[in-house]
Image: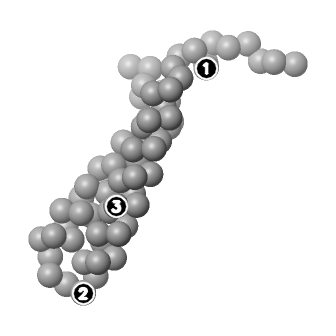
Amino acid sequence: MYKLLDLRFVIGAFFCIIGILLLIYSFQNEDTGREINRWCGVVFGVFGLFMVVISLGKDAHDELLEEPKE
């Protein structure tokens, strides 16, 4: 449940889903914009994976409970 409070995880999951949808669409559609969709899908997917990986590095629950440093 605390993973959904971590904005890095939510943003990463969103970009992964959009990247996968763009890649699927680019292989099914034979329009002129399919190369752009493939590159955007790859970039979105890589960014999404990056965000998910950095969200796994530290627990969001621990960050919420930390005392502010002075």
Q: Amino acid at mark 2?
A: Thr
Mark 3 Cα within 10 Å, few/some/many (few <14, many 20+)? Answer: some
Report which residue position mark 2 lands on: 32
Q: Who's the residue at 40% across and 52% down the image? A: 46
Asked whether the residues under the numbered discs 1 and 3 touch, taking CB atoms below 8 Å apart as contact, a structural biologist would say: no
How many marks on residues? 3
**Secondary structure under badge 3?**
helix
Residue 42: mark: 3
| Left or right of 30 on screen, residue 56 | right
Q: Amino acid at mark 1?
A: Glu
Quadrant of the snapshot with the N terminus: top left
Q: Who's the residue at 28% across and 82% down the image? A: 33
Residue 47: percent from left, percent from top: 44, 51
| Left or right of 37 on screen, residue 46 | right
Residue 16: mark: none
Asked whether the residues under the numbered discs 3 and 2 touch, taking CB atoms below 8 Å apart as contact, a structural biologist would say: no
**Secondary structure under badge 1?**
helix
Image quadrant where residue 3 sits:
top left
Q: Residue furthest bottom?
A: 32
Q: Who's the residue at 77% across and 18% down the image? A: 68
Report which residue position mark 1 lands on: 63
Q: Amino acid at mark 3?
A: Val
Q: CA distance from mark 1 to mark 2?
A: 46 Å
- Of mark 1 and mark 2, the one earlier in the sequence is 2
Nearest to the eye among marks 1 and 3: give it: 3
Can you see residue 38?
A: yes
